[in-house]
Image (spheres, rainbow, N blue to C red):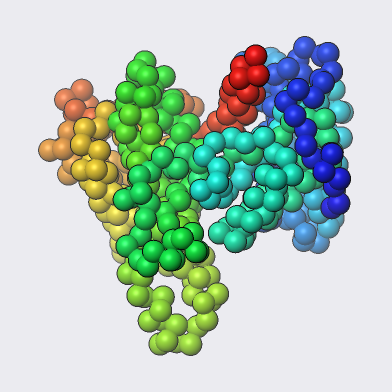
Amino acid sequence: MDLADSRIVVGLNTPLHSDKSQEDTILVINCGSSTIKYQLLAMATEQLLLKGVFEGLCQEQGQHSYTWFAENGREREHTISLSNPDYTICFNSLTDLISEFKWPSPRAIGHRVVHGGELFTGPTLIDASVLTKIEQLSVLAPLHNLVNLEGIRFCLALFSHVPQIAVFDTAFHQTMPDYVYRYPISTSWYSEHHIRKYGFHGTSHQYVAQKTAHYLQTPLATLNLITVHLGNGASIAAIEQGQCIDTSMGFTPLEGLMMGTRCGDIDPAIPLYMQKATGLNATQVSDELNHHSGLLAVAGDQDMRDVLSRSNNGEPTAELAIKMYCYRIKKYIGAFLAAIGHVDAIIFTGGIGENSAVIRSRCCDGLELLGIKIDFDLNEPPNGSSVSLISCDTGNIKVLAIKTNEELQIANEVVNYIKSSKAQQV
Ligand code: ADP
């Protein structure tokens, strides 16, 4: 897609239509390799107006599923089949949908961008130079940044008068000190090849940290937290005085905890040994570690619900996978407790962290002497609660289960960015 620079540099002072409601509508776009997810939010009330996903991108048959939310709280769903859906088809149907519902054009668009490297430490207004930098950073996340960029380019063309802001998965972790983010390897690998710990899932860690501060009615800047995001990917972050000081994911999202299909921490000599022993090439080994490891490798299933149900039925491989999964989380909790010293709360989030009382309790089992004590009854919170305290009064460290909302976090960051940019201009 060819865009003249003048079209892609949209400032925050770009004149807007007079419609009042436009002031507060933010579109959040999350482009993946085979899906485009989006949400349209009314920020005054943090109300979701529309959310949807395009699936099967660049395949013969795909679909667009979306849900829209009426003011009376009712929601309706719809799915449309799409043949050969590409970015043009998807983004055109999104703009058609927005106008069909007579929603105003969004006030701003927030784009999830996976890798911000060392260049981006917070939300950033997208202009030609930012596009170039995101493209340069794609060497660190080739599967992600290029598709993120593709989505941004389409939105810049379709919503040419709307400011667009990039929110980076890595940005929250940029506060890690050098002795944490550097690996003990040749300095030139860092200086020439940018090999260091970056961390991912930053939007989710930041969202639940802020939710915790709100729930505890304590400023985030005074809180020490350990946030445990357990979805298909999984990571854990150590947060001191509101700032990330360490996280389990590293140079890539492969390091750290055991995940659905990713191995997490293993001896770095293993991939090299296996290349020599089996003749697999680097791409094949990478595929093995990213897509055929973790729960899938040990239990034969990557979905934790299936693994749990098979373990309940006494299947040893499923039970082994759960033991490994929880043990590794527990080890990181212990390490981050030591790194931070005093911790106010541990927060479980992501599909598994939010929904599985068994996993939460097994991760904390045996940590009573460290002040972590799960309350059996509280650990089964009613469905739908967004923040649940699940620890006993007698534990020194509160344990919470919090539903993450990365899209809302991105939208909030966009709003805050616009506010602070305007304030600086005054
Ligand atoms: P993603 O990382 O793709 O956003 P999610 O955060 O939605 O993934 O998490 C997906 C994981 O959550 C899957 O392993 C799924 O089995 C697990 N999960 C969802 N609901 C439950 C539940 N009730 N109990 C256990 N695991 C669950």
Left or right: 129 with respect to 282? right
Q: Quadrant of residue 27?
A: top right
- Residue 396 lies, in percent from the top left, at 19, 28
Q: Residue at x 32, y 69 (%)?
A: 267
398 or 252: nearer the eye? 252
State which quarter of the image contains the C terminus.
top right
Name of the residue lying farthest toward the left: 369
- Residue 257 lies, in percent from the top left, at 37, 54
Residue 11 visible in the displayed image = yes
Q: Residue at x 38, y 24 (%)?
A: 220
Q: Residue at x 83, y 13 (%)?
A: 18
Left or right: 34 with respect to 141? right
63 or 288: nearer the eye? 288
254 versus 48 height, above or below: below
Q: Residue at x 74, y 51 (%)?
A: 150
- Residue 100 lies, in percent from the top left, at 87, 28
Residue 69 visible in the displayed image = no
36 versus 162 height, above or below: below
- Residue 173 lies, in percent from the top left, at 44, 42
Q: Quadrant of residue 239?
A: top left
